[in-house]
Image (cartoon, grey):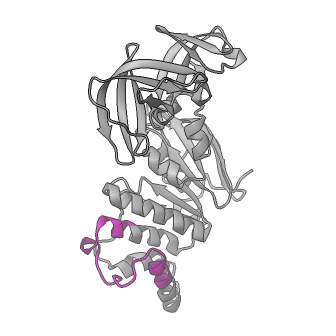
């Protein structure tokens, strides 16, 4: 049993089952992200933890105590919403200290707590401003500080950065992780942004149609996706569909791939996945004799993406992506005939 446990949780709205037989155990102090496309049930799951939705069946426990029938304000959870939900008529100071005042906390303690939180979220010097005088990033910091003011046992964040621009999102997600780590607070974070989830989480729970598709570390989610859905949703993957003719060969359309095939998938219809960063573009030199897979094709597009340049190559009737770092880049151009190579060790084989 973990610090937070969801046991066989289900929730249905009309004819739509939003969450189905959902079980999750979270250790104290962990940062866990619920990741998935719109409508997969991640926000509904978070709202059930917070108490804003009641599960049709199943149990929610925090530190061994069942929360299922306990109202939201008695669960010991702090919530940060996508839309900030600040009080427009209160200053930064008033917003952060609001919950403490409602709890009849002594004024000296409120002053000390709010001062500490202003320092923690790096908002010193603007405590007298109102929400309309703040940037989106500053408003979200205020919302985070307000959620932390009552020293919650659990921090819940529902897509808190989705309304912010890209640069602010990257900066603020790092701050959220810093704050969470410094406090050691158990955190559930909902997002549809794969990069966001992978960069700040201890664990990522990929959801699909109300169920858990995979629950693992960010590294494992990216490098060892448990299903084709996870592989397609997390990052980009080149895909080859075919038949595993033996433990080392997959026969695809006009191409035999050398890969390691699990015994249970031999003679089965399978898909081979390889990430673009594991595909090499050979600069005119002959491939090494030890190279497992060599393909020839024609460059159809070149996209500069900052740290890498993504090259799209038409080969054997399908588009293949190859990521080149600055150190790897050579003179390439549209319609150029090129050779691609990748190792079988960099491929993942899974059932269709």
Give whichever of 301, 164 is nearer the camera.
Answer: 301
Of residues 287 and 317, the one nearer the viewer is: 287
In the shown orientation, is residue 39 left or right of residue 58? left
Q: Nearer the viewer, residue 122 or 106?
A: 122
Question: Where residue 146 sits in the image (x, y, percent)?
Answer: 45, 72
Residue 116 shows in this picture: yes
Q: Is residue 35 above or below residue 124?
A: above
Asked where in the image residue 94 lies, by quadrant, the reply is bottom left
Residue 91 part of the magenta-drawn span: no
Q: Is residue 125 magenta?
A: yes
Q: Residue at x 60, y 65 (%)?
A: 185
The magenta-colored residue range is 114-140
Q: Residue furthest bottom?
A: 108
Residue at the image point whose x is 70% and y is 16% from the top: 264
* Tally of numbered tags: 0
Quick check: 300 left or right of 28? Answer: left
Outermost residue toward the front in this view: 285
Residue 11, visible in the rendered structure: no
In x, y percent, where is residue 305? 34, 44
The reply, left or right, for residue 300 in relation to residue 244 is left
Question: Based on the displayed image, in which of its 4 quarters is residue 317 positioned?
Answer: top left
Could you tell me which residue is drawn at 51 percent across and 33 percent down?
278
Q: Residue 19, relative to residue 173: is it above or below?
A: above
Q: Position of residue 155 (x, y in %)?
A: 54, 62
- x 54%, y 39%: residue: 206
Q: Tell me: residue 47, above or below residue 18.
A: below
Q: Residue furthest right?
A: 1
Residue 128 in picture, x, y percent from top left: 32, 84
Relative to the observer, which residue lies in front, 335 or 56?
A: 335
Quadrant for the C terminus, please. Answer: top right
């Amino acid at each position: 049993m973990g610090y937070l446990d969801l046991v066989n949780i289900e929730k249905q709205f009309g004819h739509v089952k939003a969450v189905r037989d959902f079980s999750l155990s979270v250790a104290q102090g962990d940062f866990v992200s619920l990741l998935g496309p719109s409508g997969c049930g991640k926000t509904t799951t978070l709202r059930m933890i917070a108490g804003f939705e009641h599960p049709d069946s199943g149990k929610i426990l925090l530190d061994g105590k069942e929360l299922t029938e306990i109202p939201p304000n008695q669960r010991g959870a702090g919530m940060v919403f996508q839309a900030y939900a600040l009080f427009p008529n209160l200053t930064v100071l008033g917003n952060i200290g609001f919950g403490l005042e409602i709890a009849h906390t002594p004024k000296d303690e409120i002053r000390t707590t709010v001062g500490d939180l202003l320092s923690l979220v790096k908002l010193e010097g603007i405590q007298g401003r109102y929400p309309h005088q703040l940037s989106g990033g500053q408003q979200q910091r205020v919302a985070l500080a307000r959620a932390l003011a009552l020293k919650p046992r659990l921090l819940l964040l529902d897509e808190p950065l989705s309304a912010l621009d890209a640069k602010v999102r990257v900066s603020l997600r790092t701050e959220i992780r810093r704050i969470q780590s410094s406090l050691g607070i158990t955190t559930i974070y909902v997002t549809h942004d794969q990069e966001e989830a992978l960069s700040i989480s201890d664990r990522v729970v990929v959801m699909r149609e109300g169920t858990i598709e995979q629950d693992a570390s960010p590294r494992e989610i990216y490098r060892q996706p448990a299903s084709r859905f996870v592989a397609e949703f997390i990052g980009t993957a080149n895909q080859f569909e075919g038949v595993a003719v033996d433990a080392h060969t997959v026969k695809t359309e006009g191409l035999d791939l050398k890969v390691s095939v699990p015994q249970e998938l031999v003679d089965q219809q399978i898909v081979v996945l390889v990430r673009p960063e594991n595909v090499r573009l050979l600069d005119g030199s002959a491939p090494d004799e030890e190279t497992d897979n060599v393909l020839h094709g024609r460059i159809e597009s070149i996209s500069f993406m900052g740290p890498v340049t993504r090259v799209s190559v038409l080969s054997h009737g399908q588009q293949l992506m190859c990521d080149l770092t600055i150190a790897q880049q050579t003179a390439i151009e549209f319609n150029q005939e090129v050779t691609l190579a990748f190792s079988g060790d960099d491929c993942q084989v899974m059932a269709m």
